[in-house]
Image: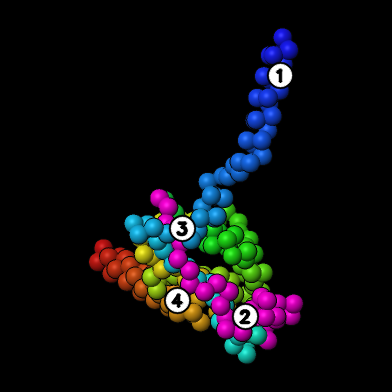
Amino acid sequence: MKKNILMIGFLLLMAVLFLKGTKIQSVDEYYLTHMEDIQEDSETVTISIRCDTLRKPENWKKLKKQLQDEKYVPEDGVILDEMTCVLRKGDTVFDILKRACRYNQIQMEYSTVMIRGINYLYDFSCGDLSGWMYKVNGKFPGKGCSGYKLKDKDKIEWVYTCDLGKDVGDDYQEKAKKQMEQLKESDKNKDQTVEKEGEAE
């Protein structure tokens, strides 16, 4: 009996020592602590975060006073210089941004559909048309970052816009304007066709 109690005590002691000396990590924690463990055969992507537009004098004046500081808007506009991340199966632009921000201790806030703020710079921090946008391989995809699946060697750039993308090279406004004009023209042509058919009867 005494032997059994000693054996149970010894096993419990060993279990406690084992658990104390073993760090249990979630999958996310593992990847965060091994962000720089890139192997030759690893698929990778790059990511950068910039807010250059806020340094333009006309935008700086509109920027909320409490954000007019080097810690929120660095002088060179670079919040995160281009860094390489391992690409895991199914990774989206959102996954990489979240991992990069956590690893580099950059504040980030998001809702289920969009990025609300990075480094305390939020939507509307610099007027009604301001907020975060992203490019992949130099192009603005025009879809939510959590829906954009990445492939090997993709280059992600997060940029802060003060003019609904126009100031960072997105021509969405121009495309939307042309589409509206085409729709109006199409409706006009339909109306004329209906009128002619009515006259023919």
Q: Secondary structure at mark 1?
A: helix
Q: Which mark is residue 74?
A: 2
The answer for how far apart the CA atoms under marks 3 and 1 are is 44 Å
Sequence-first disc among 3 and 2: 3
Where, quadrant-wise, is the N terminus in this rendering? top right
Q: Can see residue 188?
A: no
Amino acid type at image mark 1: Leu
Q: Residue at x 60, y 56 (%)?
A: 111
Q: Is residue 183 magenta?
A: no
Of labels 3 and 1, earlier in sequence is 1
Residue 103 lies in quadrant: bottom right
Regarding residue 10, the answer to whether it shows in the image is yes
Label 1: how many residues lie within 10 Å, few (<14), some (14-19) or many (20+)? few
Q: Looking at the picture, how far across and down is residue 75, in whole percent? A: 61, 84
Callout 4 touching callout 1 (CB < 8 Å): no
Q: Nearer the viewer, mark 4 or mark 2?
A: 2
Quadrant for residue 105, please give it: bottom right
Q: Whole-percent x and y of residue 96?
A: 49, 59
Q: Left or right: where does residue 146 sit relative to residue 185?
A: right
Image point 54% across, 76% down: which residue? 50
Alpha carbon separation for disc pair 3 and 4:
34 Å
Q: Amino acid at mark 3?
A: Asp
Q: Is residue 156 left or right of residue 66?
A: left
Between discs 3 and 4, the one toward the N terminus: 3
The 10 Å Cα crowd at callout 3, few under 14, some 14 to 19, many 20 or more, is few
Going by the numbered disc 2, the residue's amino acid type is: Pro
**To which quarter of the image does residue 185 belong?**
bottom left
Q: In this figure, which residue is indicated by the disc labeled 4?
A: 170
Rate crowding at label 2 as few (under 14), some (14 to 19) or many (20 or more) other CA atoms within 10 Å.
some
Give the magenta range: 61-89
Distance, label 3 to label 2, CA atoms, is 28 Å
Query: Residue 194 in the image: x percent, y percent?
Result: 32, 66
